[in-house]
């Protein structure tokens, strides 16, 4: 899995938090030590970095549920690293379905130096030629994921960082602990808009937009 230079820099900053992870009572290792502060510090640094990049390789996208008059902050925004830019002409809507290749993971922890993978649609390194895309309803995923899908074009391959406020919040969700930043690699392959024409690329019943 390819990590950017800035990601390595952030991991170096957070390393002291992982080293102090043993319980003083029984010498056991905490899987997610000081997890809330770790995630807050990581995402704040990432947000500030991305907001200062102007070459298009990083994006800051405000959550779609907020009006234009609401100022973008780290808590209501998603950070995107553009791994590959697509050439599609349109974007999915909240009521659309999509075909995507994706892998979701957490920030590095004491047992997972690349981040625990909690969900994925492909195994091993990503290969678009062999990956079988998953079908998702845009309105059925967490806010941060739904937001970025509405900005993606066919062929876009993004690494998406979702703050816990736009993910699963302050409660545990299965294998995902509370306060978790969600890191998704997402490639948009197609989207479906039943019965709604989109110019020359009409998404009529049963047809997926793939370009």
Image: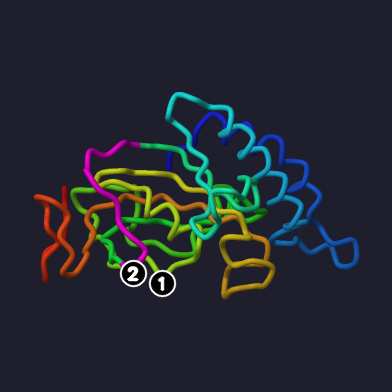
| Secondary structure mostly seen in the magenta stretch | loop
Going 46% across and 53% down the picture, which residue do you hit? 184
Residue 194 lies in quadrant = bottom left
Residue labelled with disc 1: 140
Going 77% across and 47% down the picture, which residue do you hit? 17
Going 65% across and 52% down the picture, which residue do you hit? 75
Dot 2 crowding, Cα within 10 Å, few <14, some 14–19, many 20+: some
Is 204 placed left or right of 141 in the picture? left
Circles 2, 1 touching at the beta carbon (< 8 Å): yes
Secondary structure of the residue carrying numbered label 2: strand
Nearest to the observer: residue 194 or residue 137: 194
Place of residue 98 in the rendered image (x, y in percent of width and height, measured from the top left): 28, 62
Place of residue 37 in the rendered image (x, y in percent of width and height, measured from the top left): 76, 52
Is 158 placed left or right of 28 in the picture? left
Place of residue 33 in the rendered image (x, y in percent of width and height, measured from the top left): 75, 57
Going 41% across and 72% down the picture, which residue do you hit? 140
Nearest to the observer: residue 211 or residue 120: 211
Outermost right residue: 25
Place of residue 60 in the rendered image (x, y in percent of width and height, measured from the top left): 52, 41
Residue labelled with disc 2: 137
Quadrant containing the N terminus in the rendered view: top left
């Amino acid at each position: 899995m390819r990590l950017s230079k800035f990601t390595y820099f952030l991991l170096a900053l957070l390393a002291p938090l992982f080293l102090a992870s043993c319980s003083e009572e029984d010498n056991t290792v905490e899987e997610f030590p000081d997890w809330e502060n770790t995630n807050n510090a990581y995402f704040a640094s990432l947000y500030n970095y991305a907001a200062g990049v102007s070459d298009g390789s990083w994006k800051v996208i405000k959550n779609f549920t907020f009006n234009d008059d609401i100022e973008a902050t780290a808590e209501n925004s998603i950070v995107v690293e553009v791994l590959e830019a697509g050439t599609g002409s349109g974007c999915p809507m909240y009521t659309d379905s999509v075909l995507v290749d994706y892998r979701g993971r957490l920030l590095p922890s004491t047992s997972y130096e690349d981040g625990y993978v909690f969900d994925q649609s492909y195994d091993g390194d990503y290969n678009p030629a062999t990956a079988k895309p998953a079908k998702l309803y845009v309105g059925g995923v967490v806010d941060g994921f739904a937001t970025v899908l509405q900005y993606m074009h066919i062929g876009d391959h993004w690494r998406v960082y979702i703050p816990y406020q736009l993910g699963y919040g302050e409660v545990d969700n299965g294998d995902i602990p509370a306060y978790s930043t969600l890191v998704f690699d997402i490639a948009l392959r197609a989207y479906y808009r039943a019965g709604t024409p989109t110019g020359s690329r009409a998404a009529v019943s049963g047809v997926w937009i793939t370009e």
